[in-house]
Image: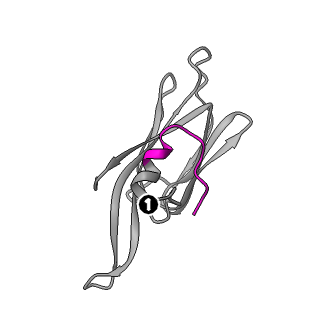
Amino acid sequence: MFEAPGIPGVADVIAWFGHWPTFHDAEVLWIFLDRSGESRVAIHAFERTREVDARGHYVLAKHAIVTFCLEGFPQDQEGITNTRIEFFNHQNVLSSARVNKTTEGYELALEGCFGVAGSIVCERISVKLRPGIP
């Protein structure tokens, strides 16, 4: 497990999952970049249980859409200061996702195992949780 970042909304994610998730096998649903407002990255996250179904697949529980909201300070409208996004396609499975504190603010690092990989650096970041399967 990764350490929970000190950003708004973390408490809701931890309350849902019981910890801060690694986002392993989670899927990036969409990335929305806005040069003058809030940009967002939505990830379908879940908990893999130890239980196996009749087909031999792990049973997944606690499905939720975790949305990272990225923005800058209103006075400078900088928002996102650096972006690298590669391999976005029809399925975007992550190895992990983490929020790192940087000198410029925060970095959302997406480590892909199939599909998208990249990082987005911004001045401020928060996270929102919407329980359920997308």
| Amino acid beneath label 1 | Ala
**Which residue occupies the foreground of this view, 77 or 47?**
47
Toward the right, the furthest residue is: 103
Toward the left, the furthest residue is: 54
Residue 46: x %, y % from top left: 39, 61
Q: Residue at x 68, y 42 (%)?
A: 101
On the picture, is 15 further left or further right than 126? left
Q: Does the magenta-highlighted stretch encompass residue 126?
A: no
**Which residue occupies the foreground of this view, 77 or 133?**
133
Mark 1: which secondary structure? loop
Residue 75: x %, y % from top left: 60, 14
Q: Residue at x 35, y 53 (%)?
A: 64
Q: Does the magenta-highlighted stretch encompass residue 6?
A: yes
Magenta segment, which residues?
1-12
Residue 131: x %, y % from top left: 31, 51
* Majority secondary structure of magenta residues: loop
Indicate the quadrant where residue 2 lies.
Answer: bottom right
**Coloration of the structure image:** one colour
**Dividing the image into 4 quarters, which one contains the N terminus?**
bottom right
Q: What residue is shown with label 1?
A: 26
Pointer 1 local density, CA inside 10 Å: few below 14, some 14–19, many at least 20: many
Q: Residue at x 50, y 64 (%)?
A: 24
On the picture, is 29 further left or further right than 70? left
Residue 10: x %, y % from top left: 50, 45
Indicate the quadrant where residue 56 lies.
Answer: bottom left
Q: Please tell me how many numbered marks the rendered image carries.
A: 1
On the picture, is 27 further left or further right than 71? left
